[in-house]
Image (cartoon, rainbow, N blue to C red):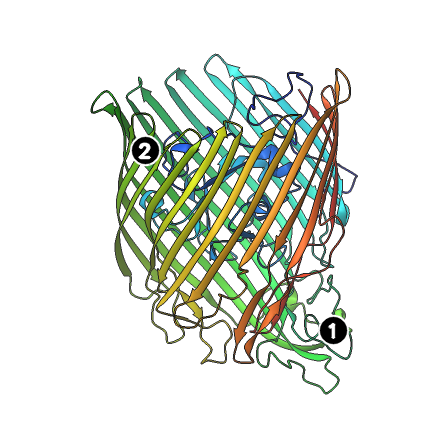
Amino acid sequence: MRVLKSAFLCAGALVPVAAHAENASADAEQRVIVVTGAREETTTATKTDTPILETPQPITVIDDELFLAQGAVSVGDTLNYVSGVTANPYGPDSRVDGAFVRGINALQFRDGMRDIFSFYASIRADLYNFDQVELVRGPASVLFGQGALGGIVNLVSKRPEFESEGEISMRYGSFDRKEALVDLTGPLGDAVAGRIVARVRDSDTQTDFVPDDRVMVSPSITFRPSPDTDFTLIGLYQEDDGGSTSQFLPLVGTILPNPNGRLPNDLFVGKPGWDRYDGRLLQGTALFEHRFGDTARLNLKARYIDSDLTYFTHYPDNYTNPANPFLDADQRIMGLYVDGSIARMEIFSTDNNVEFDFNTGSEVKHSVLAGVDYSFNSVRKTGGFAYETFDIYDIDYAALSDYGGGLPTPTYVAEDVDQDQVGVYLQDQIRFFDRFSVVLGARRDWTSAQSMGGPTRYDAATTFRAGIIGEVVRGVSPFFSYTESFEPIAGTASDGSAFIPKAGHQFEAGVKFHPADSILLTVTGYRIRETNRPVSDDTTPDPFDQVQLGSLTSKGIEFEGTAALPGDLNVIAAASYNEAELDGTGRQLDNVPKFNASLWATKGIPLGPDTSLLLGGGVRHVGANRSYGPAFPDGIVTPAFTLVDALAEVAYANWSLALNATNLFDKRYYSACLARGDCFMGSERNIMGTVSYRF
């Protein structure tokens, strides 16, 4: 689908103030990006409205003004400037969003409910739908059930407002990116408000013959029959027509020399017109909240997702002989896998809890949360597979088969999985003398999973959480926490046995420095231990076979600072060091760098009573990483890289014109090169021009 043939331009809301620092300009027309304040409240870590300074673990909140100013075009991009995170570890991937948090894949949630359950069964979430992205580091199973040890990424949906406002934006950018966006909200009656969020995009990508087209419409409505009751319904229709920007190019010809030269970054390995990643997503969410005065609150949530996806792709056979995958002496001819799947996924999730606030003394306040949640997901995939040969240095696209426009035959059932989970949880947040906070929590989960019509596997887990934070002197709040996590895994090991759930725990200690509400510096150290982690089974010829090993340890130190300084100067700084190793190997996990660092700053400059200029820029560094395998027992090193981003925006009255650039100097680099045989290209320079009208 090519959805726009004319030059639509679009943008997001880049510049309204997100948090109010004392030194922000009083001029209503001054456009600034203000970083999250130290007293900002978030619900993700505790499922209650709790200030960051009362939560005994590091939390990062990235609002939409900030991540759009940083040039984010995907969920992964929003984490580019977050400590402890390697965003997009396999480069720009038009199929899925990804991030390593403390060396471990993070799970994605939306409004506190998990919305990704399988690879390549759904399309990526649209950033324009969200007010903010929240990252909670470390295990979070006590409140969210099955979850990754590294942390969770929670996307917070835009909801209707009872004050009329809106924006219409247009954008043109690199790779012939053309977009139009609309976000309108306001009252529909005395007790009803509505909102409509929409995007239409027609775009190419940095990979030849791979489009990135989208139509997204998200209507929502809020009913407020009383000041204490809110009932919100959010709908979503999204259709993507695209492909895979990940081309799995061989090591020999990318990071390793080939006599025919280096393969180009934009090389497409496949059949134009047949390769695709096309999906349709329908989603309905209901959110209900009722407050019983100041002492109790009821929260009910539910979501249904229906997803259809067609994924047809080619990728080179780098895996039979990673050190020399070529079939000829000239190192040009390779085997070519042809892989197709048609997927259907259904998800139902609900999370229901009640919160009670009470005192057990004049200086001891409790906030007790009790809840039950349930989730069900079903994934069905029909697959087809074939094998061809080709000259990777001179691809004859016409000679490749298109299999009649459908799957290669014979077809087969590639995946047939049903999973469900029921969990009950209890948490008590205790505040002493308005200076110290203790968080205690426990949870019990019951899960079941059935794969390929086989026997149903039942598992149960109990997880605990405890933490303390206190302002020992003004502006200094040390904290300590212990958290646990578990994660059921669909599928089987290479010997045919079903995977058992991953489990683990974390100890963490740190300090939050907050000399003013507009400044927050966090330094933390952690140690995570995980068991039953699937890793590559190097004893079999299939590079995708996996086996569950004994344990993994991830430990490290993180620093993150945000400050709104005088003169409308806002700064975000981050640095992290992480050692993530399979126990007993002494080797860092594949594609997990030990060191990352970043710095982002914006400066607002008033130009007149109705005109302002916003300048911003950032530098982000991702350290080198190493991958091991039988063909490379000493490892393959992916070099470190440093990228520069920039922002310039002029605002006049209700209008604004913004220019965003990521990888401003167009550095060519590899995000990951794996000893199994393939390399992944990094993001090329992306420049976008945005015109917005806000009212």
Instruction: Give the labeled residue for mark 1.
Output: 399
Tell me: 265 left or right of 81.
Answer: right
The residue shown at (39%, 59%) is 417
What is the three-letter code of the residue carrying label 1? Ala
The kind of secondary structure element at disc 2 is strand
In screen coordinates, is 337 left or right of 528? right
From the viewer's perspective, is residue 193 above or below residue 382? above
Where is residue 163, by image quadrant? top right
Q: Residue 201 appears at what percent x and percent y?
A: 69, 42
Q: Residue at 31% across / 18% down in the picture? A: 294
Residue shown at the point (51%, 42%) measured from the top left: 282
Q: Nearer the viewer, mark 2 or mark 1?
A: 2
In the picture as drawn, the residue positioned furthest to the bottom comes out as 329
| Residue 42 in view, yes or no | no
- Left or right: residue 140 versus residue 22 is left
Residue 341 x, y percent position in the rendering: 54, 62
Q: Earlier in the sequence, mark 2 or mark 1?
A: 1
122 to 220, vertically: above or below = below
**121 vs 130: above or below:** below
Inspect this view and state whether residue 351 appears: yes
Q: Quadrant of the C terminus?
A: top right
Furthest-left residue in this view? 360
Q: Nearer the viewer, residue 638 or 5?
A: 638
Residue receiving disc 2: 437
Q: CA distance from mark 2 to mark 1?
A: 67 Å
